[in-house]
Image (cartoon, rainbow, N blue to C red):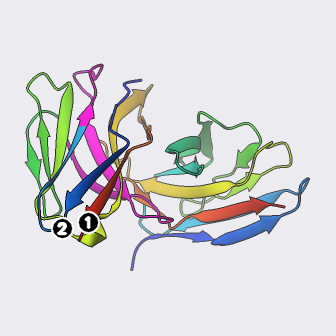
Amino acid sequence: DAKTTQPPSMDCAEGRAANLPCNHSTISGNEYVYWYRQIHSQGPQYIIHGLKNNETNEMASLIITEDRKSSTLILPHATLRDTAVYYCIVRVATGGATNKLIFGTGTLLAVQP
Amino acid sequence: DGGITQSPKYLFRKEGQNVTLSCEQNLNHDAMYWYRQDPGQGLRLIYYSQIVNDFQKGDIAEGYSVSREKKESFPLTVTSAQKNPTAFYLCASKTARLAGRTGELFFGEGSRLTVL
């Protein structure tokens, strides 16, 4: 199973861009990169995912390096409500349609006023 | 509105008692999952089910049991055999019909179990 490595914590000033890195050097060619976030004592929330191309949605942008060994989640204008633990996950597929998503410990992003 | 509902939100249990956590979804999703989260840690997969009447063990299934008699429901029983049951339990669901791609996981709000 491909594993991910993220810094345990990061700070970001309110209104500035938050750039959250993730290393996934053992990723396979057909594995996707997913990002979720979890606000304290709530269920995780899906943010974005991608395979090899950069992706953008209303919440964030995902930049994946050409060799796919790392990625960066970008929150363009961080707000206090973006304070959460952010998980970078690589899809693992076992057998047929089983798609386990393995969550690591994530990055605690603290947005400062 | 569609979503996933977990109950109860908080639960206290005495040692040696079994307890069942409810998870219901009205998203018409095929796959459902149970995760456990301990303080300051990530999520660990307990059990998952791709279709009705079928489920598979995750990474930490010992001391837990599940059933999937209906598509909408995936209850988790924490048995007395689970040595450290105090944790935050999260249920999730995902459609399995997106051929060639994984769908996003939708999570419930969690159930916090405390063993006294």
Q: Residue furthest right?
A: B16
The range drawn in magenta is A22-50
Residue sitting at 35 percent across and 56 percent down? Answer: A37
Is A110 displayed left or right of B90 in the figure?
left
Q: CA distance from mark 2 to mark 1?
A: 6 Å
Q: Which residue is mark 2?
A: A14
Local secondary structure at mark 2: loop
**Can residue A26 be seen from the camera position used here?**
yes
Q: Is residue B66 above or below residue B106?
A: above
Is residue B59 highlighted in magenta?
no
Q: Position of residue B55 (x, y in %)?
A: 60, 42
Q: Residue at x 51, y 45 (%)?
A: B43
Amino acid tagged 1:
Gln
Pointer 1: what residue?
A112
Instruction: From the viewer's perspective, tell me whether residue B10 is left or right of residue A8.
Output: right
Residue B116 drawn above or below residue A73: below
Mark 1 element type: strand
- In the rendered structure, which amino acid carries the disc numbered 2? Glu
Quadrant where the N terminus of chain B lies?
bottom left
State the image quarter where residue A95 is shown.
Answer: top left
Classify residue A50 by image quadrant. Answer: top left
Chain letter of the residue beneath label 1 in the structure image: A
Chain containing mark 2: A
What quarter of the picture does the C terminus of chain B occupy?
A: bottom right
Q: Residue at 55% across / 57% down in the picture?
A: B90
